[in-house]
Amino acid sequence: MSTENPGEQPPEPPLRGIDLARRALEEARAAAKASGKSVGQGRASRGALRPRRRRRGWSGPGPDERDPQPLGALANSLAKQRGWSGRVSEGTVLGSWARVVGDDIASHASPTTLRDGVLHVSAESTAWATQLRMMQAQILAKIAAAVGHGVVKELRITGPTAPSWRKGERHVRGRGPRDTYG
């Protein structure tokens, strides 16, 4: 038998972890209630100076504004703010020609300039130039779908250029030498 007083209860084991935190929270609430302050179950009141900010838990599987954003989205928003959207769209047409019109067309034709909505395209042969002129509406639709409407309004398709017979500083106007080919 023990030598303790028969009316006393054995000492409580020391609290640990969550039990210790729970007891501290209960004591703090009891002290706040005794002093007359309002006690909320959630967070402490923020007062009138700071607006309430909604804080969520984990972002979850879906996209969230806190997730890292792609660099392209940042570049697009910067271009819109600075008024560079038109120039960026023009650069997309010239820089991503193969992606915009397809590999088949891009292997036989290349864009040369884009000014005031007119895209100049140089084809590798006269046959391809004729074919591209017949497909002009479809090409314009592909460009509009890729970069937006109004960037390219018209296509000017040219075939290959003939070699120049003009040599030296001085030359004669007209058709040039007529006896070259017999």
Image (cartoon, rainbow, N blue to C red):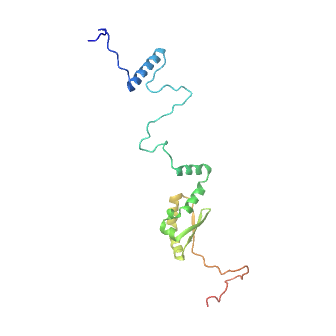
Q: Quick one: which residue is furthest to the right in this view?
A: 170
Q: Quadrant of residue 8?
A: top left
Q: Is residue 105 visible?
A: yes
Q: Is residue 74 left or right of residue 172?
A: left
> Percent from the top left, x then y, of residue 72?
53, 52
Residue at left 28%, top 12%?
A: 2
Tell me the quadrant of the picture where the C terminus can be found: bottom right
Q: Is residue 3 left or right of residue 158?
A: left
Residue at left 40%, top 21%?
A: 23
Which of 92/8 is in front? 8
Q: Is residue 141 visible?
A: no
Which of 154/122 is in front? 122
Tell me if residue 25 comes above or below residue 119 in the rendering.
Answer: above
Tell me the quadrant of the picture where the N terminus can be found: top left
Number of numbered discs: 0
Q: Quadrant of residue 61?
A: top left
Tell me if residue 74 comes above or below residue 170 in the rendering.
Answer: above
> Percent from the top left, x then y, of residue 154?
57, 65
Tell me if residue 23 comes above or below residue 122 in the rendering.
Answer: above
> Percent from the top left, x then y, of residue 140?
52, 64
> Percent from the top left, x then y, of residue 86?
59, 56
Tell me if residue 112 comes above or below residue 14 in the rendering.
Answer: below
